Image (cartoon, helix red, strand yellow):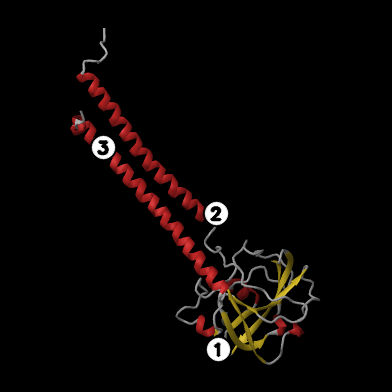
Amino acid sequence: MYRFLLTPRWLGGTALAVAAVAVCVWLGTWQLGRFEDKVSSHHEISKAMDDAGAAQPLGALLSSAQPQVTTDTVGRAVTVSGTFDRDHQLLVPNRVLDGKQGYYVLTPLRTGDGRTVAVVRGWAPGAPTGAGAPAEDAPTGEVTVSGRLQAGESIGSNGAVAGGLPAGQLGTINQASLVNKLSYDGWYDGWVSADAAPAGLTPVPTVQPQGGDGLTLRAFQNLGYTLEWFVFGGFVVFMWFRLVRREAEAEQDRALGLDPVLE
């Protein structure tokens, strides 16, 4: 009854169905792999943000071999020594902490190796006015700052803006924006949020790195695409069995002489 499967028409149709199922399975597996990669990235970032580990010198984490802040180093506890440049303090508006609008107080720290690191000494509520958190609050002389390493911001994340701010304010904390504001020889990547904040300021916790922690809407779209491709593959299998059954029933009817007579 199933000898029709060996005919050229059915052999070709079966081969096409097998190829379609294989493509669907491959695409579904690929999308699932992308989702799993983003889940893994989420776990790595969350672990780094929750477990700062033992404090390390900033220069040890951001070395010449690995100068960029990565998911392995974001949120890590660091120490850095140098002198605050109190003449070039910057206020960073549009930063939210505990659901309240405010701003960061950023003071450059000139280190012994000739480079500069952006140190956010704390967060204050409201809009920056220039009267709050005066630069004179920053310690003088050689200091050692303990804090957490943060990733550089991108425009549109964490309230960051491109520009159009008054003098003394910074829209986005990253190397490019800092170089445009202050022409130092070199900047460390990212920035450091100090653990200890002066009176009137609140320490800034580890901020979500640009791009998020992996579990974004796009990640769940990958999971949705995975289900869609597997459903498509299952539908191909269902239709193939349905057509085979219909053809087998037709073959059985013909064998019993039940074919309709055309007049």
Q: Residue at x 35, y 48 (%)?
A: 25
Asked if the residue under mark 1 is in contact with the one under mark 2, i.e. CB atoms within 8 Å, the reply is: no
Left or right of residue 106: residue 72 = left
Which quadrant does the N terminus fall into? top left
Asked if the residue under mark 1 is in contact with the one under mark 3, i.e. CB atoms within 8 Å, the reply is: no
Give how far apart the Cα atoms at labels 2 and 3 are: 38 Å
Mark 1 or mark 2, which is nearer the start of the sequence? 1
Q: Tell me the amino acid under the disc marked 1.
A: Asp
Residue 201: horizontal and vertical position, in percent? 74, 77
Q: Tell me the amino acid under the disc marked 3.
A: Thr
Q: Mark 3 falls on what kind of element? A: helix
Q: Residue at x 38, y 50 (%)?
A: 27
Which of 160 and 102 lies nearest the eye of the viewer? 102
- Which residue appears farthest toward the right when viewing the image? 131
Mark 2 crowd level (few <14, some 14–19, many ≥20, 10 Å Cα): few
| Residue underneath mark 2 | 217
Q: Residue at x 28, y 31 (%)?
A: 244
Give how far apart the Cα atoms at labels 3 and 1 are: 69 Å
Residue 166: horizontal and vertical position, in percent? 74, 69
Q: Residue at x 24, y 15 (%)?
A: 258
Give how far apart the Cα atoms at labels 2 and 1 are: 42 Å
Which of 165 and 93 lies nearest the eye of the viewer? 93
- Which residue appears farthest toward the front when viewing the image? 256
- Point out the frontmost of discs 3 and 1: 3
**Circle on res. 14:** 3
| Residue underneath mark 1 | 113
